Image (cartoon, rainbow, N blue to C red):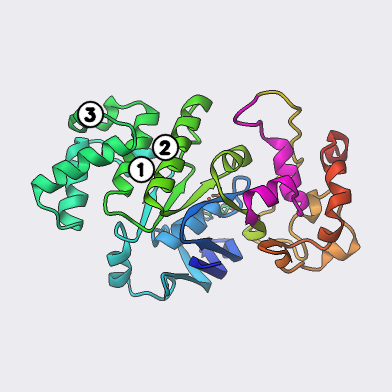
Amino acid sequence: MDALLDVRDLAVHYRTAAGPVRAVDGASFTVPAAGIVGLVGESGCGKSTLGRALMGVLPRAASIAAGSAVFEGRDLVTLAPAERRKLLWRRLAFVPQTAMNALDPVQRLSAQMQEVLVERGGLSRAAAGTRAAALFAMVGLEAGRLRDWPHQFSGGMRQRASIALALALNPALLIADEPVTALDVIVQRQILDVMRDLQARLGLAMILVTHDVAVVAYACDRVVVMYAGRVVESGPVRAVLEAPLHPYTMGLMNAFPDLERAGGELVPIEGAPPSLLNPPGGCRFAARCPFAEARCAQDPALVEHAPDHQVACWRAPEAPALRPLASEAATWAR
Ligand SMILES: Nc1ncnc2c1ncn2[C@@H]1O[C@H](COP(=O)(O)OP(=O)(O)OP(=O)(O)O)[C@@H](O)[C@H]1O
């Protein structure tokens, strides 16, 4: 697989009074040059931190402690800030967790577009106006709405506008952090349709950070499942979601309603991810895993179990026998 981005053993720590919080603790995965990769896991598993580390927009208390993230042949971890800034918007763009963070509430959309297109992209004002209208059309917004202020937009429209803004300078990789989380299901689907359509038309790569496995199933080509700061399973969406190898992936699939049809029993995974201040040794999911055994006290490595399908679970070879059990609510009851 030709990787656009190759993340290896990436570790990101927050400095706190109690010691380092290992929010990302040895995460490895690749992103191909085109297609949508879903980065999925429960709240607190380190997805947002990972996305922000790749973008170079970590909060002050956080820093990359180890690993690499090679994007178009250059390691984002060691890249000088000035070099990294050159990549932002042009090669690498970001849609932050709330669209209101992407949009400036005190500027009309047209001014925000101009700022990116003229100041960062070097377009003339006239060319920027044409490009802004085309970008709005691409995400399904009327060009006339460029004159509006962000507060005049609905949540879905704001999300469309922030995607248009992120795509302004034709990036090769777009990282979107929970782009549909605050929206109702119908609007979620519309935004995901826009993202899929743009991916296909423009041929770029996207990383879609989400806690919702139904979003991954609906919109993504590949999936990277994160648990407690680590990648526990990754591969093509179909392979991973139709035949999950990790009990955490199996559990996530029971815990979310399907975007396309209602119904079906939702079974939560009891408990919560461990604190990343002092992560447990061995498999980090073991404490919540209905299939944990003595050997799970040892840390399972992320290995290629099937072509292009990686998993970190000692019991992955038994997955075909575990899957039917994992779909029963009783298995997860404590
Ligand atoms: N500023 C911070 N200081 C200390 N710890 C933090 C900080 N921000 C996040 N963390 C911790 O880092 C871990 C990962 O958080 P992160 O937000 O990346 O997870 P997430 O999977 O994206 O969850 P969410 O969807 O809730 O944002 C969590 O344990 C969280 O408590």
Secondary-structure class at tag 2? helix
**At x 51% / y 58%, what residue is drawn?**
50
**At x 29% / y 45%, what residue is drawn?**
165
Above or below: residue 255 compared with residue 243? above
Above or below: residue 42 compared with residue 78? above
Viewer-nearest residue: 304 or 149: 304
- The reply to whether callout 1 and callout 2 are in contact (CB within 8 Å) is yes
Where residue 77 sits: x, y (%)?
Answer: 44, 72
The kind of residue on which mark 1 rests is: Ile
The kind of residue on which mark 2 rests is: Val
Is residue 40 shown in magenta?
no
Location of the C terminus by quadrant is: top right
Viewer-side label of 1, 2? 2
In three-dimensional space, the C-alpha distance between marks 1 and 2, rounded to whole angstroms, equals 9 Å
Label 1 crowd bin: few (<14), some (14–19), many (20+), radius 10 Å: many
> Which residue is disc 1 drawn over?
163
Above or below: residue 280 compared with residue 327? below
Label 3 crowd bin: few (<14), some (14–19), many (20+), radius 10 Å: some
Which mark sits nearer the N-terminus, 1 or 2? Answer: 1
> Which residue is disc 3 drawn over?
145
Secondary-structure class at tag 1? helix
Is residue 250 shown in magenta?
yes
> Which residue is disc 2 drawn over?
194
Which mark sits nearer the N-terminus, 3 or 2? Answer: 3
In three-dimensional space, the C-alpha distance between marks 1 and 3, rounded to whole angstroms, equals 15 Å
Magenta residue span: 235-261
